[in-house]
Every structure is written in C-alpha cells, then in structure tokens.
Image (tube, grey):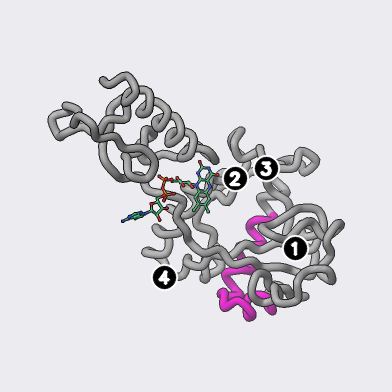
Amino acid sequence: MNGLGRRFVNEAAPYLEFVDAMYKDNASSGGRSIPAWVIFDAHFRFNYAMGPLMPGQVMPDSRLRKEWLNSVYWKAETLAELAGQIGVDAAGLAATVRQMNEYARTGIDTDFARGGNAFDLYYGDVNVKPNPCLAPIAKGPFYAMRLDAGDIGTKGGLLTNAEAQVIRADGSPIPGLYAIGNTSASVMGTAYPGAGGTLGPAMTFGYIAAHHIARGA
Ligand SMILES: Cc1cc2nc3c(=O)[nH]c(=O)nc-3n(C[C@H](O)[C@H](O)[C@H](O)COP(=O)(O)OP(=O)(O)OC[C@H]3O[C@@H](n4cnc5c(N)ncnc54)[C@H](O)[C@@H]3O)c2cc1C
C-alpha cells in the first residue's frame, strides 16, 4: 500500500508490473508510493517468509538481527501504532485492512482481483480458503516492511535481428555489430514474463551471435 494507506496494484503481480504501478501511483498520489509498504499480521509472520525474514516458526523475532527493527521491518501491537511508526495515514490503513479482511472472507478482491489467475496462485497457500492469496490481517502484533523501487535492467536499447545483429532504421544489419542483454532492445518488448526473462534471452542471443560470428557470416 502507499503512504495514504491505500492499495494501488494486485500485490501478487510480477515485480516488473508492481514497480511500474508504484511509479504510476507515485505520480498520482503526490509522491506517496515510493516507498510503498507491505503490512502483515502475526499469523502471516509465523507461517510465511517475507523478504529476508524467514517464517517466525523457524526464525522468531528474538532471533532476527537487532538492527533490522525499524530499518528492515517495523512492528507494533496495533495497526494505528504501526501507521504512526512508518508515517502512513492511519485511517487509510484501517479502512484498507477492513476491506482486505472482507475480501479474505469472500475470496474476491473487487479492486485488483488478487488470486484471480494461475500466476498469482504460485505463491498462494492452498490451505487458505476460499482464496489462497487472501487471508485476514487480524492478529497482532502487526508488521510493516518498506518497499523501494528498483530496476533489474533495461527494455530499451539497440534493435537486433534473429542473429543478434544490430539493425539500421531500414531493417538491414550492420555487419560485425551485435547486441545482447541490456544493450539490446528486449525480444519481449516491454513485457517481462518472470525471473529469467532477461538473462535467458541474453545468454541465448549471445550464443547465437557467437555462432554467427564463427560462421563468418
Ligand atoms: C536485483 C536484480 C535481480 C535480477 N534478477 C534476475 C533474474 O532473476 N533473472 C533474470 O533473468 N535477470 C535478472 N536480473 C537482470 C539481469 O541481471 C540483467 O538483465 C543482466 O545482468 C544484464 O546483463 P548485461 O551483461 O547485459 O549488463 P550488465 O550486467 O549491466 O553488464 C554491463 C557491464 O558493463 C560495464 N560497463 C558499463 N559502462 C562501461 C564502459 N563505459 N566501459 C566499460 N564497461 C562498462 C558495467 O560495469 C557492467 O559490468 C536482475 C537484476 C537485478 C539488478
């Protein structure tokens, strides 16, 4: 959620879409989405991993590095207290949690359809019903983690053909000039299907380019 305590995206979306939504919401919310915040309760903390925090059942708070408190994660007995600690609007947070708990009960997120497709369900918990991606945020203490925007690579770069040769505006290849990875435009355009979506094509087109060069083509 953003600093107003409002959601702005399906939180189960791929990270590329998530950060894109962060930037868009940051522009429309007056700069309140970078950083964004993940909010969870004691039940979630005990059962699931979040970032560097292993589930509390194997790594309780008492075993976490002391300097992580109030830098990597924040913790409070109430949501209002947590909101105060992280500078998030408390009324907005309370309203969003009420709404999320209702979605957890019905299984339908009418705002962003979290858990509404097979990809979301990959990280869901099949034991959580009716929607494996939605559980109530109800049991204190409550936790927050800060999300900053980052980049994993570029989507711009030189246009290439199927041999990884850089092409001119008219589509003809420039002999001897190849581009792969961040220097080349993505074979997937502006989309990012998931982890490996950059290194996979980079290695593949590197291999293709090397063979093309070796053939002396
Ligand atoms: C946190 C993170 C997680 C990621 N996770 C994944 C993942 O799970 N799967 C996946 O597929 N991809 C992932 N990526 C993306 C992937 O790492 C990049 O797409 C990939 O590293 C790009 O490789 P590259 O060789 O094209 O560019 P780079 O790795 O950026 O290499 C460019 C090199 O050129 C050097 N350089 C720059 N300018 C000059 C200069 N003027 N002269 C000489 N050298 C120069 C730089 O120092 C650098 O060493 C992730 C990226 C990040 C940041």
CA–CA distance in space, label 4 to label 3: 29 Å
Few, some or many residues within 10 Å of mark 1 (<14, 14–19, 20+): many
The numbered mark, 1 or 3, whose residue comes first in the sequence reads: 1
Q: Are marks 2 and 3 in contact (CB under 8 Å)?
A: no
Q: Secondary structure at mark 1?
A: loop
Q: Are marks 2 and 4 in contact (CB under 8 Å)?
A: no
Residue marked by disc 4: 31
Pair 1/3: label in front: 3
The numbered mark, 4 or 3, whose residue comes first in the sequence reads: 4
Residue marked by disc 1: 41
Pair 2/3: label in front: 3
CA–CA distance in space, label 1 to label 3: 18 Å
Mark 1 lies within 8 Å of ligand 1 (Cβ measured): no
Quadrant of residue 46 within the rendered picture: bottom right
Q: In the image, what residue occupies the spot 39% across and 34% down?
A: 188
Pair 4/3: label in front: 3
